[in-house]
Amino acid sequence: MRIGIYPGSFDPMTIGHLDILKEASTLFDTIYIAVLCNSAKNPVFSVEERTEMIRKVIVAEGIENAVCESFDGLLVDFARKKGASFIVRGLRATSDFEYEFQIDAVNRHLEPRIKTIYFMASPEHSFLSSSNVREMGHWGGDITGLVPEVIRTTISERLLKK
Ligand code: COA
């Protein structure tokens, strides 16, 4: 059984994350979307909101082998618990490389048997990040096409209230 983990803050999930998830889902028997309970990043959406939204997207997109769970602590511990051999990350631009290089080095040190594989984000979404969605949404900007449609209204309404 080939198991992958796609980790992140997903605060909130964007269409760029969905691109990566769709690609990854074709490679694994099960792909876990692992939502980090990261109080240090001061997330706008609670971990429950983030996981619930991702689960809605999984159903709407019919990605049958995807499972969304939250985690805290070390990513490699979560990966070991799930029996995963691969971590999936997305790369949008060369600026992501440095950050990913560091995460990979730490994870390799902690658990050399778990490999990280990278998918290139599609060029039309390379500018996209959760923080620019949060900013647009907060000021009432239109986020259509930037987040999965099934969670767009939930995200917009929640960000306006922030
Ligand atoms: N499309 C859109 N945005 C994307 C994206 C894509 N394909 N890929 C990354 N991003 C954005 C995110 O939206 C986020 O944007 P923001 O900073 O504006 O909110 C940013 O890139 C990085 O977020 P994310 O990919 O969610 O990473 P992260 O830094 O929040 O979390 C973990 C990275 C979860 C992998 C890492 O922190 C971790 O493993 N933590 C657990 C502790 C641990 O094991 N530490 C050791 C390893 S460092």
Image (spheres, rainbow, N blue to C red):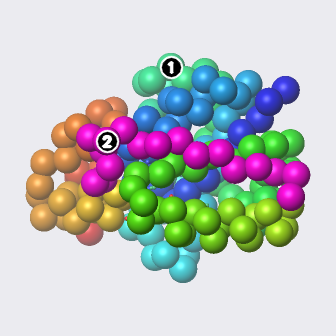
**Residue found 46% across the figure and 76% down from its top:** 42
- The residue beneath circle 1 is 62
115 in magenta = yes
Element carrying mark 2:
helix
> Is 98 placed left or right of 68 in the picture?
left
Q: Earlier in the sequence, mark 1 or mark 2?
A: 1
Task: State how far apart marks 1 and 2 are (Cα).
Answer: 24 Å
Give how far across and how far down residue 53 sits, in percent: 45, 43
Camera-side residue: 38 or 111? Answer: 111
> Is 89 placed left or right of 110 in the picture?
left
- The residue beneath circle 2 is 123
Q: Is mark 2 within 8 Å of ligand 1?
A: no
**Residue found 54% across the figure and 80% down from its top:** 40
Camera-side residue: 98 or 78? Answer: 98
Outermost residue, bottom direction? 40
Image quadrant holding the C terminus, namely bottom left
Vertical position of residue 18 compared to residue 143: above or below: above
Three-letter code, disc 2: Pro
Vertical position of residue 18 compared to residue 133: above or below: above
Kindly check if marks 1 and 2 are in contact, taking CB atoms under 8 A apart as contact: no
**Does residue 62 appear in this view?**
yes
Vertical position of residue 23 compared to residue 11: above or below: above
Give how far across and how far down residue 97 sits, in percent: 51, 62
**Residue found 84% across the figure and 26% down from its top:** 1
Camera-side residue: 42 or 48? Answer: 42
> Is 156 placed left or right of 96 in the picture?
left
Three-letter code, disc 1: Gly
Give how far across and how far down residue 48 sits, in percent: 53, 54
Q: Which residues are magenta?
A: 112-128
